[in-house]
């Protein structure tokens, strides 16, 4: 009786309308859930600031890779195996007795010492070599063949980082061997552990390591086949063999457990 009066006075729905209202309520909630799922995701999915991948190329080379964005990279001097650092990332350029033999510079400041100091990260020792450069102003990567950081071309020398190695020459398949040998790529035809860094036309960056020995050609071929969905622009070979090391939540690669003296680390994990 009371419910009948309330329906009459306040406009409450009749009992026959309840199933329709319930269906409308459920439909509204379903639409809300679908809408929330379809919203653009953040740059880094699942609260991670990188994407980890393992993939095997047709030549049998297994690649372990970290995909991230250039603003999430910091070059760091270390004196340990990458696997025991608190940072996620991979090994950097070449070294000898603690001296950096590859360019490792942030905003015109070498990682160890001062400009023009031997072993500081200011030079690619002995030869001009492929150097991966992130220009924070133009928001563009490049690989420049230089011998010291004075030669690096960027928009603002207080807004860039540069990691030396050896050119991959990904856009020049007919010339890459000649260029890599001209840059004195170590153990070119010998099976060794390998490391590298490559980028695509959207300025995504991959840091790549193997856990089994392969030649330089096998490593490069595997990268072209499996990384970046055929959008890669260029990249560099980093130090290899026992120095090929990685640290992530998903995978730890120790190389031969040696200490290395520089790494490419993630600012945010």
Image: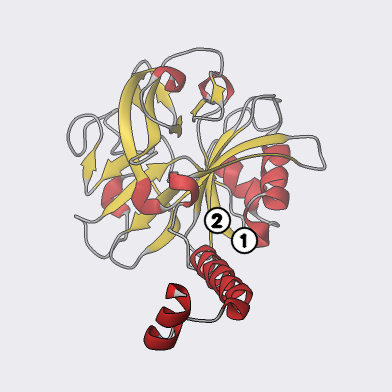
Q: Residues within 10 Å of mark 1 (few under 14, many from 20)?
A: few
What element does badge 2 sit on?
strand
- Image: 106 above or below 81: below
In this view, the residue farthest toward the front is 1
Q: Residue at x 49, y 51 (%)?
A: 45
User: Badge 1 is on which residue?
Assistant: 171
Disc on res. 63: none
Q: Residues within 10 Å of mark 2 (few under 14, many from 20)?
A: many
Is the C-beta separation of discs 2 and 1 under 8 Å?
yes
What element does badge 1 sit on?
loop
User: Badge 2 is on which residue?
Assistant: 234
Q: Return the x and y of residue 255 as percentages of the image width and height.
A: 56, 19
* Residue 226 visible in image: yes
Q: Return the x and y of residue 26 as percentages of the image width and height.
A: 58, 68
Residue 261 picture quarter: top left
State the separation of the CA atoms marked 2 and 1: 7 Å
């Amino acid at each position: 009786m009371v419910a009948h009066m309330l329906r009459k006075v306040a406009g409450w729905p009749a009992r026959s309308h309840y199933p329709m209202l319930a269906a409308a309520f459920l439909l509204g909630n379903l639409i809300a859930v679908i809408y929330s799922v379809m919203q653009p995701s953040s740059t880094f999915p699942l609260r991670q600031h990188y994407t980890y991948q393992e993939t095997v190329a047709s030549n049998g080379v297994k690649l372990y890779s970290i995909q991230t964005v250039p603003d999430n990279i910091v070059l760091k001097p270390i004196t340990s195996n990458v696997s025991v650092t608190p940072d996620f990332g991979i090994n950097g350029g070449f070294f000898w007795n603690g001296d950096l033999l590859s360019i490792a510079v942030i905003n015109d400041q070498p990682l160890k010492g001062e400009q023009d100091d031997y072993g500081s990260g200011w030079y690619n020792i002995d030869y001009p070599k492929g150097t991966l450069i992130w220009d924070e102003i133009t928001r563009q990567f490049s690989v420049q063949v230089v011998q010291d950081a004075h030669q690096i071309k960027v928009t603002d020398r207080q807004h860039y980082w540069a990691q030396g190695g050896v050119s991959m020459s990904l856009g020049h398949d007919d010339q890459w061997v000649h260029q890599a040998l001209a840059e004195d790529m170590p153990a070119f035809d010998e099976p060794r552990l390998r490391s590298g860094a490559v980028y695509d036309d959207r300025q995504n960056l991959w840091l790549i390591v193997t856990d089994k020995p392969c030649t330089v050609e096998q490593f490069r071929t595997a990268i072209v086949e499996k990384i970046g969905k055929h959008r890669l622009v260029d990249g560099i070979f980093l130090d290899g063999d026992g120095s090929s090391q990685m640290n992530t939540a998903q995978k730890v690669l120790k190389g031969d457990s040696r200490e290395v003296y520089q790494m490419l680390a993630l600012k945010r994990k």
